[in-house]
Amino acid sequence: MKTLDVTALILVIIGAINWGLIGFFRFDLVAALFGEMSALSRIVYSLVGIAGLYAISFLGKDRETREIK
């Protein structure tokens, strides 16, 4: 996997965990760590959003590895 793919996947996972916490427990981890809509939390939210948009490209990629004989 390319470094950008791994980074995007990690950010998407962080976003998914945060949304799960919000949905189940009404607890926003990003806001708790960095402050409610502080500059740093807005950066984190923005990066997660961009990573989510980039992750859409994963749907069109062929990840199957093939052996050459």
Image: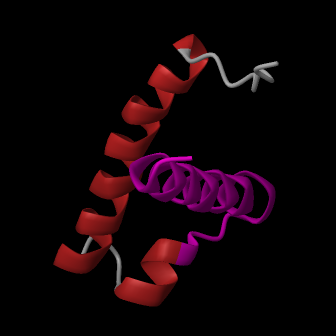
In the image, the segment drawn in magenta is 1-29
Chief secondary structure of the magenta portion: helix
Q: Is residue 10 above or below residue 37?
A: above
Relative to 1, 43 lies left or right: left
Q: Which residue is nearer to you in this view: 56 or 63?
A: 63
Q: Where is residue 68 in the image (x, y as percent from the top left)?
A: 76, 20
Residue at screen point 46% across, 22% down: 57
- Residue 31, horizontal then vertical, whole percent: 44, 76
For this rendering, which residue is in front, 51 or 1? Answer: 1
Image quarter where the C terminus lies is top right
Q: Which residue is drawn at 45% across and 38% down?
A: 52
Most extreme residue toward the left is 39
Q: Can residue 48 be found in the magenta stretch?
A: no
Residue 14 appears left or right of 34? right
Q: Where is residue 64 in the image (x, y as percent from the top left)?
A: 75, 22
Residue 55 appears at what percent x and percent y?
Answer: 49, 33
Residue at 68% of width from left, 25% of height from top? 63
- Examine the structure image and report whether residue 17 is included in the region drawn in magenta: yes
